[in-house]
Every structure is written in structure tokens, then in C-alpha cells.
Image: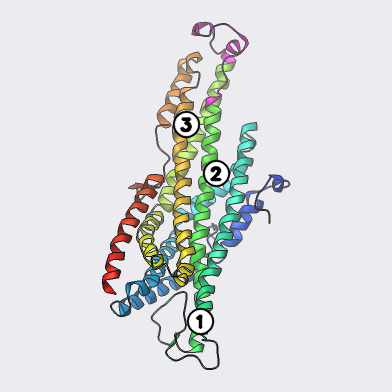
Amino acid sequence: MKILSDGSDLEGVEKVEDIFYINLARKSMWILDSWPKTPNESVTYRYFVLALNVATLVGGAVYLRNNTGVLSSFELGHTYITVFMNCITCSRCIMILSREYNEVMLSFVNKIHLFHHRHKSEYAYKTHIFIHKISHFYTVYLLGLALNGLLLFNMIPFYNCYSRGMFRDVIPANATYDHSVFYSVPFDYTTKFKGYIAMTSFNCFISYTCTSYFCVVDLTVSLVIFHLWGHMRLLTYHLANFKKPASVLESNENTDAIKDHSYTQEELKEVFGKLREYIRHHNLILNFSSEMSNAFGPALLAYMVFHQVSGCILLLECSQLDMKTLVRYGPLTVVIFQQLIQISVIFELLGSSNDKLIDAVYLVPWEYMDTKNRKLVFVMLRQSQRSIDLKMMSMLTVGVQTMTAILKTSFSYFVMLKTVAEEEQ
């Protein structure tokens, strides 16, 4: 598996599903069954995963209720984090079950992916290769990160049990088994070996599911945004390099005399066709971004709330500064904050491309056109004022500003929680 692609892996590819990174992303979705389905395909497994995640959420919430006031804030911090993570898995599971999600993903595979637009021009092909390289690297990188995070999340409790001597014939007195996730269940899994095996097996499966809901869904959203950004680059380039009249291109004199340099009748027909094509292309982008907001908006809002809450709790856990705590929570803290920064920067990349499109429309040589084509330029100019920023529930835009506000608030809440936790001790 190559981390970087030079584009040679596209040779012989005849459909989007055959592209390596798309195929890799599709295989990584098997545990979620989140690849878009046709209306005739069964979604029973998706409901099973939802029921499993809801049961896990209830078990974790009951554990919190039973141990609040019994365990310290530091000890309960881990369960708070896992319960909040489980809330995100449930929200994303519901999103995957929605009709809007399935339609958006089918539209991405069948219409939006730049593989379908690579033949439009030489620049379209170059953009397709450029986005392909970014998408390939990001897919391999994020799935590798998810695998490492999954191993650390489950191996650290195993190591803690080993270091305590919990796998000996006679376990130490008053010692308990450590787990990656804790729940309230009708059997003892903290002191009984059989209970430990059963809970560890379940935690391995549910943590893999949770990791997939975080990383694989983030990967899916990011790949869609990369290609939408590629469409904006393509449209901006075509408008900024709109062909001028042949008389202007052939003349070396001052082109201020507009009347002497107008499009010919044949050129005006070509201009009309090009402008209509670009307006349709922009409509495709706008409609798809609107569909994305409907499909991903509620889940992204829950995701931002999760980052707001979990960020300060993770900082609180890491503030103990002992090696055991840092090994357990340090990587998770880095991954959580990194995910927030990554997704925000990617969305900001898309939002900022709209300003370049507006500038490109202004560069269109409308002064050489007739009234009919100038009206089309006016339509494109008005249409370009519509933002393609993805909004969460039509309220909040995903981007760097939102990320900055979340980080600032997380640090403020962390200071407050740190004070409260110290008073408890």
C-alpha cells in the first residue's frame, strides 16, 4: 500500500468504485455497513448496529449514575468521555440510516466525483489527478491513524491488568481488572476472569465500531469536500480564463475600444454554450452542498458539541501529569483535537474557494458580449454570491472560526473543572 500516489494507479480504472482509495474506504465501512445502498438492498444490519450502540450508551450512562459521588472526577472522566463518544456513534448511525445520507453518497459516487469530469478539459484532468493524490494520502493516513488509536485504546487496559498481576493463578487482593469502557451489567467483570474475557471481547468489537464511526465517517465527509473543492477550482479556472474574441487575441493594440473587438456571431453561440455549461456546473455544486448540509448537518452539530465537552475533560485527565495517565489519555487527546482541526480546516478550504469564484466571474469578458450573453453573466454573478459553506442545522458554519471558539471554550472549562476536582481531593 503506497502512502503517496503518483496517479499511475488510475490506469485501467473504468468506474469510481475501482479507484484504490475509494475501494479502501469502502472496505473500511464494512463494520458500519455505511456504503450507499440501492432501494432494494437490506439495511437490517444498520438497525442492529444502532440497537447495539444504544444499549452500550444506556449501560455507560447507568454506570455514571451509579458511581457519581462514589468515584472521583478523575476516575469518572474516562467514562464521561466514552459515553459522549457513544452519543456521537448513535447520531452517526442514525445519519447513515437516513435517506438523505444515502442519496448524497450515491450522488457523490455517480455524479460529483471528479472521475466523471476529467474529460472536460486539460485542466479538469489535472485537477482530477491533484484531488486523487490528496484523497489517496488522506485515506491511507486517516485509516492508519484509526488503527493505531484502536490498538492503543485496547492494549493499555490489557497492559494495566498484566502489570497488576491479574493474569496470575492467584490475583492480588482487592485488585480489579481494567477495561477500555465501563458499563453497568448484570455480571461481575472487574474481579471475575470469565466476566473480564466477555467484557474485553465486547469492548474490542464496540471500540472498533466507535473508531469507525469517528474516523471512517470523517474520512467520507472529507473525501466529498475534497472533490467539491476540486469542482470549485475547476469552475473558477474556466471562468477566469474565459476565451476572449479572436480579434482581441490577434490584436496588439489597446483593447479599450470595445466596439471594435466584439464576439462574432459564431463566437457568441460558443460563448452562450460555455456560459450555460458553467451555470449548470455551479448549480450542481450548490445543490449538492445543500444536500450535504441536510444529510450531515445534525451529526456535525452533535460532533462539535462533543468536541466542546470532551476537550475539557481530556485536558483534565491529562493534567494529572503522571506517566500512566499520559499514556492512556495523551494519544486520545491528540487524536480528538487533531480530528477537530482537520475537519475544520477542510471545510474552511471549501468555504474560502467561493471568494475566488466571485473574482473569476468578474474577470469574464462580458464587455465583448451581446445582451443575451451578458444576462447569463449576470445570472452567474448573482449565483456566485451564494455561499457553499456547510451549515450545521442551518445555524452554524463549520470552519476555522468555529474550531477556534471551541478550543478557547474547552480551555476555559478545563480550568474550571481542574479547580473543582482539586477541591474534591
- Check if mark 3's residue and mark 2's residue have beta carbons within 8 Å: no
Give how far apart the Cα atoms at labels 3 and 2 are.
17 Å
Which amino acid type corresponds to the residue marked 2 in the rendered image?
His
**Circle 2 sits on which residue?**
227
User: In the drawing, what numbered circle is on residue 356?
Assistant: 3
Residue appearing at x 37%, y 53% in the figure: 407
Give how far apart the Cα atoms at labels 2 and 1 are.
46 Å
Q: Is residue 121 visible?
A: no
**In which quadrant of the rendered view does residue 57 lie?**
bottom left
Which amino acid type corresponds to the residue marked 3 in the rendered image?
Lys
- Secondary structure of residue under mark 2: helix
Q: What is the quadrant of the N terminus in the image?
A: bottom right
- Secondary structure of residue under mark 3: helix
Q: Residue furthest bottom?
A: 170
Residue appearing at x 63%, y 38% in the figure: 118
- Secondary structure of residue under mark 1: helix
Q: Give the mark toward the camera: 3 or 1.
A: 1
User: In the drawing, what numbered circle is on residue 161?
Assistant: 1
Please rate how many residues cluster around mark 2, counting C-alpha atoms within 10 Å: few if below 14, some from 14 to 19, many from 20.
many
Residue appearing at x 59%, y 10% in the figure: 247
Disc 3 or 1, which lies upstream in sequence? 1
- The residue segment tinted magenta is 240-266
What is the x, y in percent for residue 301? 37, 54
Toward the viewer: 339 or 46? 339
